[in-house]
Image (tube, rainbow, N blue to C red):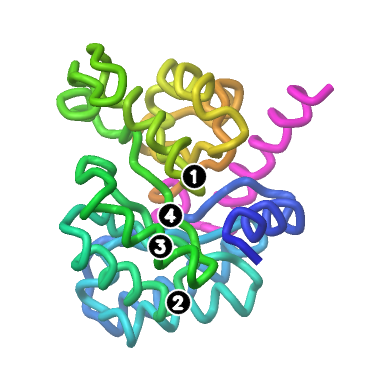
Amino acid sequence: MSFRLKMDASARSAESNIILALDLPPDRPHQLLQRSLRIFELASPHICAVKINRQLLLPLGLFKGVEEIVKLAHQHDLPAIMDCKINDVGHTNRSIAENYYHAGFDAVIANPFVGWEGGLQPVFDAARELKRGVILLVYMSHKGAFEGYGQTVLDAETKTLKRQYLVFARKAVSWKADGAVVGATYTEKIAELHGILGDEVPIYSPGVGTQGGSVNSAIKAGARFLIVGRSITLAKDPSEAARHVQEEANRCLTRLRS
């Protein structure tokens, strides 16, 4: 089953479009792993996938602690996404992707700044061979995102000046990416980019909660999946926090469908 189909099936089964960003503050590796597993278990009934980045990878290691979290996710029939922001030359990019795929990750996140030929094409090739996914960064959620993704650039295909994020959205469609990251903190960008990406490339929106992104606003603007981290991981009761976000998202989706 392709990554896109896995995500759709997981969202239906869990009745949730919430992805848990399992990003925890620094701690000793053993304690960090145990906290991560505990928070995941508590939140798992209310999410459709888990996302991990280098905050866990560096202290825990790929084929040790992080792989244990991925295996646990799969035991719950939840996809695991590696937020590695692949951003190097082609042969290195493929090696990075293959290592994450072999560790069990269902998808990786990559940065389209490096381009296709000799850049991300090998990542997409590896993904297709292994039936995994590639999600592209189109517009990040932090305050300085506009400095990079909002630059005015010369579109190599049309020879016209465009905002960088619009060029990236077109690439996401033409490269047949499995998703596009667009920050929930910029709902006007979600709406604008949804007009390009449509249902062909689903939008994954980080920044809900602690960073100021709104569940309702992101979904109304066109986000398909919401990536939620500290609002759940730092909550006194991660299960209740995850349930609250899930229910809020489902209420919004119900209103939009009615």
Residue on which disc 3 sits: 125
Residue on which disc 4 sits: 134
Identified at 78% across, 30% down, the residue is 254
| Dots 4, 2 in contact, CB < 8 A | no
Q: Give, as a three-letter code, the residue at label 2.
A: Ile
Q: Compared to 213, does 53 lie above or below?
A: below
| Dots 3, 1 in contact, CB < 8 A | no
Place residue 90 in its image quadrant.
bottom left
Q: Give, as a three-letter code, the residue at label 4.
A: Val
10 Å crowding of disc 2: few (<14), some (14-19), many (20+): many
Q: Give, as a three-letter code, the residue at label 3.
A: Asp
Asked if residue 254 lies in the magenta stretch, the reply is: yes
Residue on which disc 1 sits: 176
Would residue 227 be visible to someone looking at this image?
A: no
Q: Mark number for residue 69?
A: 2
Identified at 67% across, 49% down, the residue is 16
Q: How far apart are marks 4 and 2 (CA)?
A: 20 Å
Camera-near label (4 vs 2) is 4
Residue placed most toward the observer, 15 or 85: 85
Judged from this view, the residue extending furthest toward the right is: 258
Image spot of residue 173 (x, y percent) = 47, 36
Q: What segment is highlighted magenta in the picture?
A: 231-258
Tell which circle, 1 or 2, labels the residue nearer the N-terminal end. Answer: 2
Identified at 37% across, 44% down, the residue is 136
Tell which circle, 4 or 1, labels the residue nearer the N-terminal end. Answer: 4
Place residue 149 in its image quadrant.
top left
Q: Distance between the residues labelled 3 and 1?
A: 11 Å
Q: Compared to 8, does 75 lie above or below?
A: below
Tell which circle, 4 or 2, labels the residue nearer the N-terminal end. Answer: 2
10 Å crowding of disc 4: few (<14), some (14-19), many (20+): many
Tell which circle, 3 or 1, labels the residue nearer the N-terminal end. Answer: 3
